Amino acid sequence: MLRPNFTEEEVAHIYQLFMEYPSGVAKRKLHVVYLKALELSHQEIVRIARVSGDSVTRYLRAYIEGGVTALCLSQRHCPGSALLPYSEVIKTRFQAHPPHTVAEAAYEIEKLTGIQLALSACRDFMHKRLGMRYRKMALIPL
């Protein structure tokens, strides 16, 4: 069981950050560390903060190793698109020769970059990254 030592200044600083911090994840971590600074047991912290026992241990270990700054860092995984380096090339190609269907666009992207996309991923990339819109094509009545 981890038992970090807290000074009165540290406890006051952790409480102030806990009350003022805007991020929900960091606020939960600060709450757990603050409860531990009040010398509550792990089981009581789990019950009060509604986190798992492993999370309590992980948050306390992060505090011991890196202090308050380690608790406030966001470590969410945000994967990037493999097509981002090619977006300008794809955009100029599609402006010169617009694809008629999403399948044709996916084929052109694969030919240009070597990256194979599902139709839904291709549609999302064209809409979100390239700013393209869907156009319904139909014959003009006579």
Image (cartoon, grey):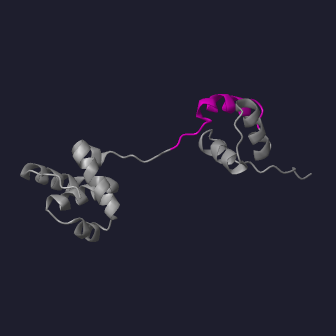
Is 2 placed left or right of 94 in the picture?
A: left
Q: Is residue 54 visible?
A: yes
Residue at 25%, 53% in the rendered image: 60
Q: Looking at this view, is 34 or 96 the one in front? A: 34
Task: Give the residue drawn at x 20%, y 66%.
Answer: 41
- x and y percentages locating residue 121 in the rendered image: 66, 47
Camera sees residue 23: no
Position of residue 31 measured from the top left corner of the image (x, y, whole percent): 24, 59
Q: Is residue 86 magenta?
A: yes
User: Is residue 138 shown left or right of residue 88?
Assistant: right
Q: Is residue 73 on the magenta stretch?
A: no
Q: Residue furthest left?
A: 8
Quadrant of residue 50 within the rendered picture: bottom left
Q: Which residues are magenta?
A: 79-98
Residue closer to the observer: 86 or 137: 86
| Quarter of the image where the N terminus is located | bottom left
Q: How many marks?
A: 0
Q: Residue at x 67, y 28 (%)?
A: 89
Q: Main secondary structure of the magenta part?
A: helix
- Residue 94, image x and y in percent? 72, 34
Q: Nearer the viewer, residue 15 or 50?
A: 50
Q: Is residue 4 above or below residue 108?
A: below
Q: Residue furthest right?
A: 142
Q: Position of residue 44 (x, y in %)?
A: 23, 70
